[in-house]
Image: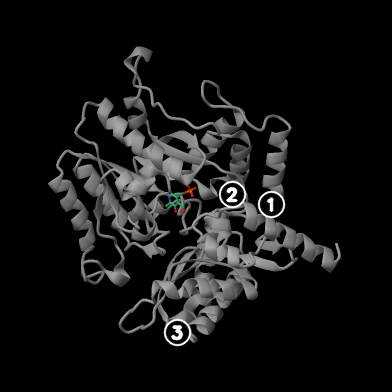
């Protein structure tokens, strides 16, 4: 293709995008006024646009890519599955790929989790966990347990149940009349502590607030739902060590279920295969998506214990069935990609390599400590949030309309990295496959862009 042909193709695609597409979480008026970056291809941890420019995939294509793109082993597994069947249902039928995927998944998940219910997105996995938790109590005769607790700043997806759990004002407020009531507990956000305390002297006082809700609603809480270790979408809010364990203990004391949403944190992101492992916690229900298929295809799972599964058993006419399912539940292509991805974790010793990679990323980000508009760098493994502030001493935030994070990521594109901000937080969430040198390059670009942009604000 000549340069002119390439440009013409690019412009035709941009024009068609502008005419036909509606992008998620995007102010379309602004989108239509700009020329978008159109991803055309990828190789390893790099993406290529329609103009042939190369970028580091600094947020793993929205937090899901694990081993890089066009991984020979996953490509081969999907192609091989295509020679057998692309899709078949789990409603009334079993399938080879979904059985193998569930088996492999349970080799990695915390001991005690034994049952896999497949779906196709993080939000659906959470929706399923909510309904399972609710129905479990109903079936056991504990019918008053119909309420849920979540954390402020929580993000569990965009379906109505998941949004009900959500605690992000910006995303969730408008839908309030459509949502069911959820008790929201103070967020463990140490940099901006909602209780104006300091960790560790506080003894994780915000956990006591969670317990107080349980005390006020004795016997009424079905489950506490939380993102363990890092609340991703609210700005990579990292929890103090021991927080998840405290939540487990509180749920146990009050006879409620603990639902850990590992959609973002699962599959190695925080330095362990699953974030709950940091605190040695086994949840009653765990939701996974994103990295489950290596970032290849839509797949999600709600994983639970034999105890919960058994609540639903009974004769057909007793109607204890879990009446829930999606057309693409356990899609064989996605399951095949997932099995190949999980085998790569083992074959490449990926989990073992994570501490080294996390340390390399931390070293590369160390200069941020001296930057006048970086309030805090929060990191767990390969999940990083760099919080930009107008004033480091007072922690004053940049005004929403200034779009500080957005300006940084626009600048990063010019330097060859794709990033996506969360408000004033610049997020780095690289594929686990990035080498230490690539991690250093990514961090270097992010810090250089922060320096440049904040100097002008
Ligand atoms: N749960 C968590 C913790 C997430 O971070 C996300 C997405 O970012 C979701 C659920 C929703 O996942 P999906 O976009 O696949 O519906």
Q: Do the CB atoms of the residues marked 2 and 1 lie less than 8 Å apart?
A: yes
Q: Is residue 240 visible?
A: yes
SS for dot 1: loop
Mark 3 sits near ligand 1, with its Cβ under 8 Å away: no
Q: Earlier in the sequence, mark 1 or mark 3?
A: 1
Q: Which one is in front, 376 or 247?
A: 376
Which residue does the numbered mark 2 point to in the structure image? 294
312 in relation to 182, above or below = above
Residue placed under numbered mark 1 in the picture: 71
Q: Position of residue 342 (x, y in %)?
A: 57, 45
| Dot placed on the residue nearer the N-terminal end, 3 or 2 | 2
Graded by Cα atoms within 10 Å as few (under 14), some (14 to 19) or many (20 or more), the crowding at tag 3 reads: some
The span from disc 3 to disc 2 (Cα, nearest Å) is 35 Å
Identified at 59% across, 67% down, the residue is 33
Judging by the rendered image, the residue that carries numbered circle 3 is 371
Q: Quadrant of residue 284?
A: top left
The kind of secondary structure element at disc 2 is: loop
**Looking at the image, how many numbered discs can be counted on the residues?**
3
| Dot in front, 1 or 3 | 3
Query: Up-down: is 138 above or below 454?
Result: above
Q: Residue at x 36, y 76 (%)?
A: 397
């Amino acid at each position: 293709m000549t340069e002119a042909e390439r440009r013409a193709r690019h412009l035709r695609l941009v024009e068609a995008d502008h005419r036909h597409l509606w992008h998620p979480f995007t102010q379309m008026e602004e989108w239509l006024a700009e020329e978008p970056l159109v991803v055309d291809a990828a190789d390893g941890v790099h993406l290529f646009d329609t103009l042939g420019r190369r970028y580091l995939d600094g947020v793993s294509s929205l937090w899901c890519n694990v081993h890089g793109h066009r991984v020979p082993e996953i490509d081969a597994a999907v192609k091989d599955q295509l020679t057998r069947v692309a899709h078949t249902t789990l409603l009334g039928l079993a399938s080879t790929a979904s059985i193998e995927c569930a088996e492999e998944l349970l080799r990695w998940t915390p001991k005690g989790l034994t049952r896999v219910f497949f779906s196709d997105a993080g939000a659906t996995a959470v929706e399923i966990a909510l309904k399972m938790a609710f129905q479990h109590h109903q079936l056991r005769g504990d019918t008053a347990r119909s309420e849920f607790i979540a954390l402020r700043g929580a993000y569990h997806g965009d379906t109505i149940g998941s949004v009900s759990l959500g605690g992000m004002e910006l995303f969730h407020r408008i839908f309030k009349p459509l949502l069911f009531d959820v008790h929201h507990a103070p967020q463990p956000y140490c940099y901006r502590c909602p209780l104006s305390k300091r960790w560790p002297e506080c003894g994780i006082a915000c956990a006591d607030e969670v317990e107080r809700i349980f005390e006020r609603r004795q016997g009424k809480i079905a489950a506490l739902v939380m993102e363990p270790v890092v609340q991703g979408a609210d700005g990579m809010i990292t929890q103090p060590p021991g927080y998840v364990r405290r939540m487990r203990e509180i749920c146990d004391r009050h006879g409620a279920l603990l639902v850990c949403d590992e959609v973002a944190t699962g599959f190695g992101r925080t330095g362990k295969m699953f974030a709950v492992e940091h605190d040695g916690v086994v949840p009653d229900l765990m939701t996974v998506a994103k990295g489950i298929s290596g970032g290849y295809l839509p797949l999600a799972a709600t994983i639970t214990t034999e105890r919960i599964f058994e609540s639903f058993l009974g004769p057909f006419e007793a109607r204890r069935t879990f009446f829930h399912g999606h057309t693409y539940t356990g899609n064989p292509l996605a399951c095949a990609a997932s099995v190949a991805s999980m085998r790569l974790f083992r074959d490449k010793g990926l989990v073992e390599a994570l501490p080294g990679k996390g340390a390399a990323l931390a070293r590369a980000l160390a200069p941020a400590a001296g930057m006048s508009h970086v309030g805090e760098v929060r990191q767990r493994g390969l999940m990083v949030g760099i919080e930009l502030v107008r004033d480091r001493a007072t922690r004053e935030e940049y005004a929403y309309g200034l779009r500080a994070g957005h300006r940084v990521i626009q600048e990063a594109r010019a330097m060859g990295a794709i990033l996506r901000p969360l408000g004033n937080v610049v997020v780095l969430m690289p594929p686990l496959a990035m080498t230490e040198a690539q991690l250093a390059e990514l961090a270097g670009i992010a810090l250089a862009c922060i320096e440049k942009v904040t100097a002008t604000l």
